[in-house]
Image (tube, rainbow, N blue to C red):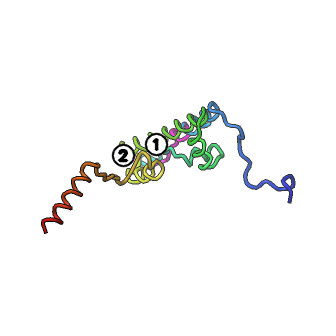
Amino acid sequence: MSETNRKKRGRPRKITSWTPKLLQEYADYYFRKCDERTRVVITKDGPETINDPAPYTVEGLCNHLGITTVTFRDWCRKSGPLAEKSRLLRQRITENRVTGALDGKQNPAFARFMLTNNHPEDYREKVEVENSVSEEAKNMFDEWKQLWKTTR
């Protein structure tokens, strides 16, 4: 089958050429939509609508943009204005996750899980310690080893 006869599969992308300005406009709408989420609770006076903001997520933003998370991560890794805007948006999502966990509005255990898995370079579970011995200490150790052998 030739390239021209192939059928395109999947949903067509909403936008094919992203600019930092367009990305910011779409992201602002997504963040506003999350902030304005409400839910209905039953009180003694009847049903009442309360504000219940949704946490920001990279996956939610990508769904709203009509792109995959792989595409978004690729944007973040590259250089240029679109990459810088993508990194700022990811940082805003992370800030929402951290402040939500600290304020008690989001589950802290889940926030920790998301941060350690999505940002391993910034949030680590374990501390890695590098043991190294200076050349001077290594030489002293070798001398002591020789002295110990001669005194036996």
Q: Which residue is mark 2?
A: 104
Q: Residue at x 51, y 41 (%)?
A: 90
Which one is in front, 127 or 18? 127
Q: Residue at x 56, y 42 (%)?
A: 77
Which one is in front, 47 or 85? 85
* Place of residue 142 in the rendered image (x, y in percent of width and height, measured from the top left): 24, 58
CA distance for labels 1 and 2: 15 Å
Question: Residue 102's quadrant in the figure?
Answer: top left
> Which segment did they paint magenta?
32-41
Residue most extreme to the bottom: 152
Callout 2 crowding tier (Cα within 10 Å): few <14, some 14–19, many ≥20: few
SS assignment at label 1: helix
- The kind of residue tagged 2 is Gly
Q: Which residue is mark 1?
A: 94
Q: Is residue 47 above or below residue 20?
A: below
Residue most extreme to the left: 151
Callout 1 crowding tier (Cα within 10 Å): few <14, some 14–19, many ≥20: many
Which one is in front, 124 or 18? 124
For residue 39: magenta? yes
* Place of residue 129 in the rendered image (x, y in percent of width and height, measured from the top left): 32, 52
